[in-house]
Image: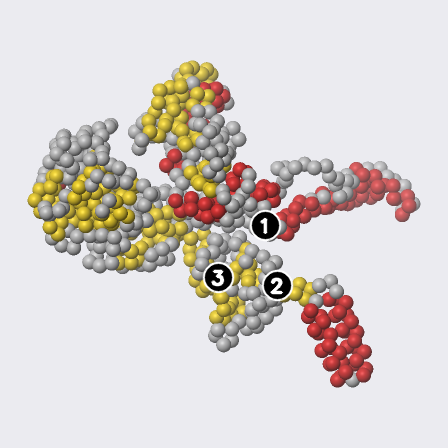
């Protein structure tokens, strides 16, 4: 490997002789050792042999001068630097039941799922991380409010003295107006479920019974409503697709067209948050979801009359749980202990993912007594009785504590052996006494770091996980093979793409990481320290981090902007990299904050957030060279230009250095022109316009053209194709 990225300090070669120097030195020694050899011309066969061996020696010296590089790697080993293992991709998978069950049903953790295997690729295996409880939902309250508040305050109970409970959580009665008589944008109704039911991550089918076409004037294929659930921090959308709403915005249009009866009900399939806690708003407590009226936009038309229903029922038809890209191996036999210090064993599968609480070494002695061992980074603080071991995640090598001898122990052993030979002449009894006296002294000169597994003990790895890598970042809808049989489950699928998978660290990456590690010394003091430690906390799931300057308001709060790793294959597909693929998930945020909390200064508060992503769209007129000015040539050039723009304006692989568009750097028209000028197919560049795409409210909007797009000090540039905004790059070739 080359160390071009390290500081180039003045240094001398260990042996600076060249090939010519070696040949000249050999020729000078010929008269001394072989005076009869007088022909020193290049045509002489002996000179040919001299040149051959000089060439071989020159190659050896070249290898010899590379010893400092190997010493650098050995220095990393002395520092305890290890290559970071790959990070498994995380995904949420949804299990669908064959039918609703009358009681609580739990799917255990450790269920294996996989993508479909094809001829060119192996199946990618995922394993669920926690059990999934599919409960029986019970509706307790139906409330309405004149506006969609974050913390609802003005609530009106619609069930009191009107409807009655007809079954386990099913309600029915006279015709009930969901909203007010004249629905306005922001009107909403709430469903409050019993907090005793475990419904985290459940997929529920909400059955709505009503009258046909009561909300006149709406577009049934795009109703003006939004389903949301309170996840403890915010209202989260829970309706994946419009086709999951068979009521079509409570109009029952398609049901009536097919001859169905709306009074029998139609289902709305809602996927609740993986964490759906019970909270209290005003005097009502439970698990909350709501339906909000939306204003007219795009093809949406508002309600002219409120929807009217006659009954509500709910049942769980499945659930969603988190899974990671890994395969779990349990109780693997490593071998039998010899009772010697420093024993090593190798796991059958590598690389080994970061260990969890139940993943450790267990030894079973001859009496069948198990003992649990603890993994440590090194044996520096391990005593002779400490059940410690180390694990190299990349190689899968497990090592037990070594025994280190002091420098004077060798002299003690030589003296003991000499004493033993002297006593041999005096008799066996005297020799045994001398050896017994010398053994305690020799043992005192040896130090055992970590306990030694007793001889004959069987050594097991209770459990470990293998897998990880960027290959686990699969697209939505690809994890659909159930490798572990689960009763009542008919289908499994990932409704969102897998994220945060990364390959293991290479030696080059470790060499670059070490100077930052030595500078921060695992303590977060400067902004660079926070950025370095944030990357370490992500374990490959964080692509970039930026620590903002501390505010002068005296709060002592450090704000770190985090850009997670994302799948960049969408760039080659001509779609760019949408900000939705770069969202900071709560699980990763909590992982980063926990890591920084142990390394921050006392009194400093740390927060993590996403950058302010600003979209950019380019409209340009381009004139091509005559050789490319035909239909196929123009299409090829347009495709190349779009890919170049998507690669340039994105926060992961964009920017001048290919490390992501810098934070706070504006985009100028000159940046686009400079990119176009690198294409020899372009003869002339016409008018170029930039359009800024900003997130306003709950949607992205394209602003009027501007000469410069400034993302602000807390933002960066992101470019993607949005079919609703038609915000791709508009390029015209002539």
Instruction: State which quarter of the image contains the N terminus.
Output: top right
Instruction: State which quarter of the image contains the C terminus.
Output: top left
- Residue beneath the point at 43% across and 34% down: 611
Q: Residue 7 or 506: which is nearer the viewer?
A: 7
Dot 3 alpha-carbon crowd within 10 angstroms: few under 14, some 14 to 19, many 20 or more = some
Q: Nearer the viewer, mark 3 or mark 2?
A: 2
Q: CA distance from mark 3 to mark 2?
A: 19 Å
Question: Whole-percent x and y of residue 717?
Answer: 43, 29
Q: Residue furthest left?
A: 174
Q: Is residue 242 something that shows in the picture?
A: no
Return the residue at label 3. Answer: 360
User: In screen coordinates, is 112 left or right of 458?
Assistant: left
Quarter of the view holding residue 197 = bottom left
Q: Is residue 289 something that shows in the picture?
A: yes
| Circle 3 SS class | loop
Return the residue at label 1. Answer: 81
Query: Is there CB contact under 8 Å for labels 2 and 1?
Result: no
| Circle 1 SS class | loop
Dot 1 alpha-carbon crowd within 10 angstroms: few under 14, some 14 to 19, many 20 or more = some
Return the residue at label 2. Answer: 449
């Amino acid at each position: 490997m080359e160390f071009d990225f390290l500081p180039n300090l003045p240094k001398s070669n260990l042996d600076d002789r060249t090939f010519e120097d070696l040949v000249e030195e050999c020729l000078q020694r010929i008269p001394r050792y072989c005076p009869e050899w007088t022909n020193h011309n290049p045509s002489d066969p002996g000179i040919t042999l001299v040149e051959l061996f000089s060439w071989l020696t020159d190659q050896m010296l070249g290898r010899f001068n590379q010893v400092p590089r190997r010493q650098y790697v050995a220095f990393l080993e002395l520092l305890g630097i290890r290559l970071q293992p790959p990070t498994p991709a995380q995904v949420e998978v949804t299990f669908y039941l064959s039918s609703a069950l009358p009681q609580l049903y739990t799917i255990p953790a450790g269920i294996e799922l996989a993508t479909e295997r094809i001829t060119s690729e192996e199946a990618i295996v995922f394993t669920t991380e926690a059990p999934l409880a599919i409960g029986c939902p019970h509706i307790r309250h139906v409330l309405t409010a004149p506006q969609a508040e974050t913390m609802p305050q003005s609530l009106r109970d619609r069930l009191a003295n009107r409807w009655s409970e007809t079954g386990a959580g099913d309600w029915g009665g006279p015709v009930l107006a969901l909203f007010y008589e004249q629905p306005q944008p922001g009107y909403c109704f709430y469903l409050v479920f019993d907090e005793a039911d475990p419904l985290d991550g459940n997929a529920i089918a909400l059955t709505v019974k009503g009258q046909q076409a009561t909300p006149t004037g709406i577009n049934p294929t795009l109703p003006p409503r939004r389903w949301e659930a309170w996840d403890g921090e915010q209202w989260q959308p829970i309706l994946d697709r419009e086709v999951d709403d068979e009521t079509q915005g409570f109009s029952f249009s398609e049901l009536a067209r097919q001859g169905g009866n709306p009074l029998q009900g139609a289902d709305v399939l809602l996927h609740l948050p993986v964490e759906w806690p019970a909270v209290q708003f005003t005097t009502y407590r439970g698990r909350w979801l709501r339906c909000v009226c939306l204003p007219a936009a795009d093809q949406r038309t508002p309600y002219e009359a409120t929807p009217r229903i006659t009954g509500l029922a709910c049942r769980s038809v499945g659930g969603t749980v988190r899974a990671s890209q890994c395969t779990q191996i349990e109780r693997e036999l490593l071998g039998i202990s010899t009772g010697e210090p420093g024993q090593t064993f190798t796991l059958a599968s590598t690389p080994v993912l970061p260990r969890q609480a139940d993943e450790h070494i267990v030894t079973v002695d001859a009496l069948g007594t198990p003992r649990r061992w603890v993994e440590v980074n090194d044996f520096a603080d391990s005593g002779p009785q400490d059940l410690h071991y180390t694990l190299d995640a990349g190689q899968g090598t497990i090592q037990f504590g070594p025994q280190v001898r002091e420098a004077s122990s060798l002299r003690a052993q030589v003296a003991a052996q000499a004493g033993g030979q002297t006593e041999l002449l005096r008799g066996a009894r005297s020799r045994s006494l001398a050896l017994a006296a010398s053994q305690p002294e020799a043992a005192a000169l040896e130090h055992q770091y970590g306990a030694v597994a007793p001889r004959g003990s069987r050594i097991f790895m209770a459990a470990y996980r293998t897998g990880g890598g960027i290959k686990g970042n699969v697209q939505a809808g690809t994890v659909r093979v159930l490798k572990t049989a689960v009763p009542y489950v008919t289908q499994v699928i990932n409704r969102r793409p897998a994220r945060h998978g990364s390959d293991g660290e290479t030696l080059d990456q470790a060499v670059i990481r070490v100077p930052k590690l030595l500078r921060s010394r695992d303590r977060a003091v400067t902004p660079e320290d926070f950025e370095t430690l944030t990357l370490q906390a992500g374990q490959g799931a964080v692509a970039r981090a930026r620590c903002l300057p501390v505010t002068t308001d005296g709060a002592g709060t450090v704000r770190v902007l985090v850009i997670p790793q994302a799948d960049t294959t969408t760039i080659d597909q001509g779609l760019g990299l949408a900000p939705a693929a770069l969202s900071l998930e709560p699980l990763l945020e909590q992982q980063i904050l926990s890591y920084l909390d142990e390394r921050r200064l006392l009194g400093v508060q740390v927060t993590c957030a996403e950058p302010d992503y600003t979209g950019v769209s380019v409209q340009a007129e381009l004139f091509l060279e005559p050789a490319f000015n035909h239909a196929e040539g123009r299409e090829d050039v347009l495709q190349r230009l779009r890919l170049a723009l998507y690669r340039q304006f994105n926060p992961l692989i964009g920017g001048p250095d290919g490390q992501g568009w810098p934070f706070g750097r504006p985009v100028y028209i000159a940046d686009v022109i400079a990119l176009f000028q690198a294409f020899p197919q372009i003869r002339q560049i016409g008018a170029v316009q930039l359009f800024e795409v900003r997130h306003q409210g709950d949607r992205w909007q394209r602003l009027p053209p501007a000469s410069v797009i400034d993302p602000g000090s807390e933002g960066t540039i992101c470019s993607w194709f949005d079919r609703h905004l038609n915000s791709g790059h508009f390029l015209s070739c002539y």
